[in-house]
Image (cartoon, grey):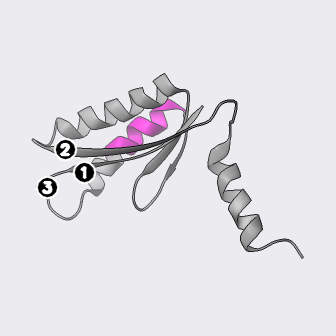
Amino acid sequence: MIVCEFSIVPLGKGESISSYVAECMRIVQGSGLAHQLTAMGTIVEGEWDEVMAVVAECHRAVRSRSPRVLTTVRLDDREGAEGRLESKVRSVQTKVSPPA
Protein backbone atom coordinates (compact mmCIF):
# COMPACT_ATOMS: atom_id res chain seq x y z
CA MET A 1 0.00 0.00 0.00
CA ILE A 2 1.16 3.49 -0.76
CA VAL A 3 0.11 6.91 0.40
CA CYS A 4 0.53 9.39 -2.42
CA GLU A 5 0.29 13.15 -2.17
CA PHE A 6 0.01 14.89 -5.51
CA SER A 7 -0.73 18.30 -6.93
CA ILE A 8 -1.33 19.25 -10.53
CA VAL A 9 -0.96 22.86 -11.64
CA PRO A 10 -1.92 24.12 -15.09
CA LEU A 11 0.66 26.80 -15.89
CA GLY A 12 -0.46 30.11 -17.33
CA LYS A 13 -4.12 29.70 -16.31
CA GLY A 14 -4.32 32.45 -13.70
CA GLU A 15 -4.42 32.44 -9.92
CA SER A 16 -7.50 30.27 -9.38
CA ILE A 17 -7.25 26.66 -10.43
CA SER A 18 -10.23 25.34 -8.47
CA SER A 19 -12.05 24.13 -11.60
CA TYR A 20 -9.03 21.94 -12.41
CA VAL A 21 -8.90 20.63 -8.84
CA ALA A 22 -12.62 19.86 -8.96
CA GLU A 23 -12.13 17.88 -12.17
CA CYS A 24 -9.36 15.86 -10.52
CA MET A 25 -11.48 15.29 -7.40
CA ARG A 26 -14.24 13.76 -9.55
CA ILE A 27 -11.63 11.33 -10.90
CA VAL A 28 -10.27 10.55 -7.43
CA GLN A 29 -13.74 10.04 -5.95
CA GLY A 30 -14.70 7.80 -8.87
CA SER A 31 -11.68 5.59 -8.19
CA GLY A 32 -13.10 4.43 -4.86
CA LEU A 33 -9.69 4.87 -3.20
CA ALA A 34 -9.34 6.43 0.24
CA HIS A 35 -8.44 10.09 -0.23
CA GLN A 36 -8.19 13.52 1.37
CA LEU A 37 -8.26 16.91 -0.29
CA THR A 38 -5.96 19.43 1.38
CA ALA A 39 -5.24 23.09 0.70
CA MET A 40 -2.01 22.15 -1.09
CA GLY A 41 -2.81 18.86 -2.81
CA THR A 42 -4.66 15.58 -2.74
CA ILE A 43 -3.68 12.47 -0.79
CA VAL A 44 -4.68 9.01 -2.06
CA GLU A 45 -4.08 5.60 -0.48
CA GLY A 46 -4.10 2.29 -2.33
CA GLU A 47 -2.11 -0.20 -4.31
CA TRP A 48 0.67 1.19 -6.52
CA ASP A 49 -1.00 0.57 -9.89
CA GLU A 50 -4.37 1.95 -8.76
CA VAL A 51 -2.89 5.11 -7.29
CA MET A 52 -0.58 5.77 -10.23
CA ALA A 53 -3.50 5.27 -12.64
CA VAL A 54 -5.51 7.92 -10.77
CA VAL A 55 -2.61 10.39 -10.80
CA ALA A 56 -2.04 9.77 -14.51
CA GLU A 57 -5.73 10.23 -15.31
CA CYS A 58 -5.81 13.49 -13.37
CA HIS A 59 -2.68 14.71 -15.13
CA ARG A 60 -4.13 13.89 -18.55
CA ALA A 61 -7.42 15.61 -17.71
CA VAL A 62 -5.66 18.84 -16.71
CA ARG A 63 -3.24 18.60 -19.63
CA SER A 64 -6.18 18.35 -22.05
CA ARG A 65 -7.18 21.87 -20.94
CA SER A 66 -3.73 23.44 -20.60
CA PRO A 67 -0.66 23.50 -22.85
CA ARG A 68 1.67 23.08 -19.87
CA VAL A 69 1.13 21.24 -16.58
CA LEU A 70 3.31 20.77 -13.51
CA THR A 71 2.58 17.58 -11.57
CA THR A 72 4.28 16.91 -8.23
CA VAL A 73 4.09 13.48 -6.55
CA ARG A 74 5.31 12.31 -3.12
CA LEU A 75 5.04 8.63 -2.17
CA ASP A 76 5.13 6.76 1.12
CA ASP A 77 5.50 3.07 0.28
CA ARG A 78 5.13 0.85 3.34
CA GLU A 79 4.62 -2.88 3.26
CA GLY A 80 1.52 -4.22 4.96
CA ALA A 81 0.22 -0.90 6.26
CA GLU A 82 -3.36 0.14 5.49
CA GLY A 83 -5.64 2.91 6.69
CA ARG A 84 -2.79 5.34 7.14
CA LEU A 85 -4.70 8.41 6.03
CA GLU A 86 -6.38 8.43 9.42
CA SER A 87 -3.85 6.55 11.56
CA LYS A 88 -0.89 8.82 10.72
CA VAL A 89 -2.84 11.92 11.70
CA ARG A 90 -4.27 10.26 14.82
CA SER A 91 -0.77 9.21 15.93
CA VAL A 92 0.47 12.80 15.83
CA GLN A 93 -2.66 14.18 17.48
CA THR A 94 -2.27 11.85 20.46
CA LYS A 95 1.30 13.09 20.91
CA VAL A 96 0.26 16.74 20.72
CA SER A 97 -2.67 16.38 23.14
CA PRO A 98 -2.29 13.15 25.11
CA PRO A 99 -5.45 11.99 26.93
CA ALA A 100 -5.76 13.24 30.51
At 44% from the left and 49% from the top, the residue drawn is 42
Q: In the image, which residues are magenta?
A: 23-32
Alpha carbons under labels 2 and 3: distance apart: 10 Å
Answer left or right for 13 relative to 79. Answer: left
Given this view, does label 1 or label 3 mark the residue nearer the observer?
A: 1
By secondary structure, the bulk of the magenta-drawn segment is best described as helix
Which element type, helix, strand or loop, lies under badge 2?
strand
Answer left or right for 1 relative to 26. Answer: right
On the image, the x and y values in percent for residue 45 come to 56, 38
Query: Disc 1, disc 2: CB below 8 Å?
Result: yes
Alpha carbons under labels 1 and 2: distance apart: 6 Å
Query: Disc 1, disc 3: CB below 8 Å?
Result: no
Which element type, helix, strand or loop, lies under badge 1?
strand
Residue located beneath label 1 in the image: 9
Residue located beneath label 2 in the image: 69
Q: Earlier in the sequence, mark 2 or mark 3?
A: 3
On the image, the x and y values in percent for residue 44 come to 51, 41
Q: 50 above or below 67?
A: above
Q: Which quadrant, please, contains the N terminus?
A: top right
Q: Which amino acid lies under the numbered mark 3 shown in the image of this protein?
A: Lys
Q: 62 above or below 41?
A: above
At 55% from the left and 27% from the top, the residue drawn is 47
Alpha carbons under labels 1 and 3: distance apart: 9 Å
Given this view, does label 2 or label 3 mark the residue nearer the observer?
A: 2
Dot label at residue 13:
3
Q: Which amino acid lies under the numbered mark 1 shown in the image of this protein?
A: Val
At 46% from the left and 33% from the top, the residue drawn is 30
On the image, the x and y values in percent for residue 4 come to 48, 41
At 33% from the left and 30% from the top, the residue drawn is 57
User: Callout 2: few (<14), some (14-19), or many (20+) C-alpha neighbours within 10 Å?
Assistant: some
Q: 26 above or below 10?
A: above
